[in-house]
Amino acid sequence: HGFLVDDRAPPHLPSLPVIGSLLSLRSDSPPHIFFQQLQKKYGDIYSLMMGSHKVIVINNLHHAKEVLLKKGKIFAGRPRTVTTDILTRDGKDIAFADYSATWKFHRKIVHGALCMFGEGIASIENIICQEASCMCENLTNLQCSAVDLGPELTRAVTNVVCTLCFSSSYKRGDPQFEAMLQYSQGIVDTVAKDSLVDIFPWLQHFPNEDLRMLRSCVSIRDKLLQKKYDEHKANFSENIQRDLLDALLRAKYSSENNNTSTQDVGLTDDHLLMTVGDIFGAGVETTTTVLKWAVLYLIHHPQVQRKIQEELDTNIGMDRHPQVSDRANLPYLEATIKEVLRIRPVSPLLIPHVALSDASIGEYFVQKGTRVIINLWSLHHDENEWKNPEVFNPERFLDKERKSLCYPSPSYLPFGAGVRVCLGEALAKLELFLFLSWILQRFTLEVPAGQPLPKLQGKFGVVLQPQKFQVIARFRTGWEKKVQTQESESG
Ligand code: HEM
């Protein structure tokens, strides 16, 4: 088996010096699916060489839990790559930072800041509802025309994150917002491609053009972040904490007052900026993509939409909008969200983990520095755990009476688990619930007449994205009249 001599090493793909296992990794399938296919030949856990790096790929829950939970701290490292170093000023963020006191501290501050918004949930709810209301207004104006909901969803989600981070948001067509969309896309298209290029010949082109593009997008992002940072510094007050940036500044000033070096605790200007940048990076593309997948599956499954709408009609009706407190009464919608996160996990390979010391996974020895890829796709499509895993069926998450949620299998980790678990899980779930319930209360989503149903295959990149598609958001019975009445009342 290649160059591994240790008997206890996992099955190994053939590899050559320099190029590693490239020759064995040629496939037309995207990596998460190819890794799933390789199980047939090599088993649930196997290793390969990514250039000069050892990589272990895990395809079952048992070993995933060992890495993420039981030995979470040992496997809490992150690999450094050229692109993530450009994006994060050499790992001064959270998601791509290696395990360290600084990383821990930043996680704690962000976690605290996300909980801080009025008893945790209350005012985050207001922020999201404000955006949901705006989005529904835009959809009202677009009645009966075929639209790509992508930009609408992106703006809504971006505004939630902007409000949380900076207390600011954007209107439709705002040039600063458009600029932000553009640089985000540039970052999404290029970041992390370098490490992926090593593993996946699918992506073998990594010309310097990509690096140039990444640098230029990051520099536009950084100017915007810097501007917000300077404004916040100028208006900082000990007594008021408006947003995440205030929370970070407060931590910085308090450590300075205690005469602690900000370099030592990781509270330099660079660290603060990169952490805020990270929340954008991790919070916008992911949530928006899940919303797009949800819309896509809903137009494929009108009967699911109808059931959610019946649930909304029974529990909420037309006289008020959906709220967080409705969540427990809308199990069909909750089950649908769970099923979307299962069938199309936006981050099918999580973010790579790294062994911080020599360790073991199952019966196998793992050398310090080995990268570990958890193939969430395999967990979510495991035929031993899920009946017909390729079939979209929200009811698998409901009990017999379809009144409450249930978990048919533990082989389900859309947000990861353990010390590196997603920091925005609660926020993301709240956004998914509120945006979808607002939309489906008012509109039915349909494929434009004469157009084929968009494909369900994803495009693999930093996140697993659906292809672009158009929908019509048609008013449900009674809503058109209601909106007209509201408009004439408000003059
Ligand atoms: C990490 C999923 C939304 C912040 C992650 C990871 C996954 C994930 C799978 C990697 C876990 C690992 O490496 O083991 C998702 C999904 C989302 C979502 C499916 C939307 C539905 C958000 C939001 C935020 C956020 C809204 C910000 C408020 C983060 C951060 C990390 C992370 C900071 C890095 C944590 C660390 O490395 O310590 N997320 N996420 N995510 N997520 Fe999310």
Image: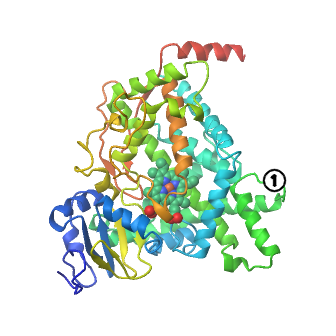
| Image quarter (top left, top right, bottom left or bottom right) of the N terminus | bottom left
Residue 98 seen by the camera? yes
If the image is split into quadrants, where does the C terminus sit?
Answer: top right
Visible residue check, residue 228? no
Q: Is mark 1 within 8 Å of ligand 1?
A: no
Dividing the picture into quadrants, the one containing residue 403 is top left
Expressed as whole percent of the image width and height from the top left, the position of residue 323 reads: 59, 32
| Kind of residue sitting beneath label 1 | Ile
- Dot 1 falls on a residue whose secondary structure is loop
Q: Nearer the viewer, residue 428 or 53?
A: 428
Q: Could you tell whether 217 is left or right of 47 in the image?
A: right
Locate residue 127, reporting x and y percent. 65, 40
400 shown above or below 457 = above
67 sits to left or right of 329: left
List x then y, in percent, for residue 145.
Answer: 45, 26
Q: Residues within 10 Å of mark 1 (few under 14, many from 20)?
A: few
Q: At 51% across and 44% down in the image, what residue appears?
A: 429
Residue that carries the numbered disc 1 in the rendered image: 240
Instruction: Name the residue rendered at 15%, 65% in the picture.
Output: 41
- The correct choice, above or below, for 384 with respect to 403 in the image is below
Tell me which colouring the rendered structure shows.
Answer: rainbow
Up the image or down, 73 lies above or below 442; here it is: below
What residue lies at 36% left-to-right and 56% top-to-bottom?
348
Q: At x 39% / y 23%, what residue is drawn?
A: 306
- Between 332 and 218, which is closer to the camera in this rendering? 332
Question: In x, y percent, where is residue 428?
Answer: 53, 47
**Looking at the image, is 143 positioned above or below residue 124?**
above
- Give the number of callouts: 1
